Image (tube, rainbow, N blue to C red):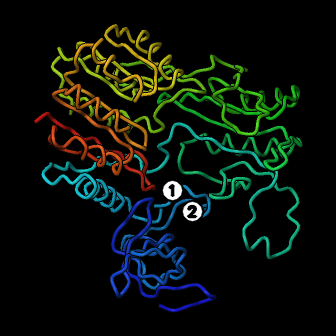
Amino acid sequence: MRKKNKNIVLENIRLVSAGAKGVAIGKTDDGKTVLVSGAVPGDLVNARVKKSKSNYFEAEAVEILEESPYRVAPKCVHFGVCGGCKWQNLAYEQQLVFKQDEVYNHIKRIGGIEDFETLQILGNKEQYFYRNKMEFSFSNARWLTQYEISSEENFGNRDALGFHIPGMWSKILDLKECWLQEDPSNAIRLAVKNYAVKNGLEFFDVKEQTGFLRTLMMRQNSKGEWMVLFQLFRDEKENREKLFDFLLSEFPQIRTLVYCINSKQNDSIYDQNVVIYFGDGFLMEEMDGLKFKIGPKSFFQTNYKQALELYRKTLEFADLKGDEVVYDLYTGTGTIAQYVARNAKQVIGIESVQEAINAAKEHAELNGLSNCTFYCGDMKDIFNDEFLANHPKADVLITDPPRDGMHQKVVEQILKLAPEKIVYVSCNSATQARDLALMKDQYRLVKILPVDMFPQTHHVENIALLVKI
């Protein structure tokens, strides 16, 4: 260990595994854990300490002394700057190993559960271009690199269309390319930016809250049909119509183009009036014969193909015979509920967001599923003794909560309900493991299946099957 510029630098740290949020983990000579950003497992590094805790350091790599055998060349020119795809420099096969290990270790360490089967992680066939929805922001103050700043050059036009720099909300990285959404996503974004600059359209000023162009969102379905949504800070009818007509003439894949005028401080569209300029204002998606209507505000899985695999595995874990009552907690737009409904007697879905419940009911009707019933309310409030008394007992319960996991009251109600089988789908295996620990006296964890929904990131889903003891 040595000091440099008044900062502690840890020398010759061998990074051996991956930790939460994609950091690499090593140890000092005296056994203290070091969580290192900016490196991958297998690297030998010098790392500058950012935070010192009683039993670990948080640090960032300042020098890579020896490269990991798992290192690969990142594909994207913006790697390391935009904040996304942080594992592009880590071989995909090794990403899967670390993701599976993380889930397994959470279940054992946090859940305190030892005896269960761990199935091989379900990798993603597409390692890039797997997202069907992307959002980009306009800014008149493009983020400058330290090199550009120190050069003292006058960069003239600083308009940008891209992603927010992590930790610097007012700064936008002007994207030359993105490997997350397939073509023509990059082409549409670049065409919009070039047209706007050429025609003097005003990009949004985040600090001053002024300008014309604010955000650009693109969605696609599995048929190659596209939706484009513009958020405009103010309406400039002539400029708006010329921009939209240009885009429609250049990209026949765009099946619908919508916009909203959003002059409030945040760019959330859920309380905004979205106007249809071209097309129906929605796209249709199909999943194993089920149809879903996807609008600009719709909640829908951003990785369609892998979401379908996850639903198939969820149904496989549930192993329905056709005469079961199924509860689907945190049902969202009811995609899982409807996916399993064709194999169940009755499905009851609960969700806190009214727009999602409205969509679930619309989709159930669209798909001719008369055995699905949906309720809206905060889960810990609506899923109570009265609800259980007024509805048939569940044979199987499926739960797919947000990252925070389930409220303790919800877990307690599940234990009162006492279904024979629980299928727990999670996007955060740490909170899932916490919840499983609360149920382990009444339920046996049979098996888990980690599912990779987001290659090149540290995120991993997990499906757990529990049976009543």
Amino acid type for the residue under numbered disc 1: Cys
Q: Are marks 1 and 2 in contact (CB under 8 Å)?
A: yes
In this view, 197 is above or below 337: below
Q: Which residue is mark 2?
A: 79
Q: Is residue 99 above or below residue 332?
A: below
Residue 247's x, y, as percent?
73, 32
Task: Left or right? Give the position of 212 relative to 403.
Answer: right
Could you tell me residue 248's position as x and y percent?
71, 28
Element carrying mark 2: loop
Is residue 267 shown left or right of residue 467? right
Extreme-left residue of the structure: 469
* Amino acid at pointer 2: Phe
| Residue at numbered disc 1 | 85
For the point 61% across and 35% down, which residue is it?
A: 218
Q: Tell me what residue is drawn at x 63 percent, y 28 percent.
A: 270
Residue furthest front as drawn:
385
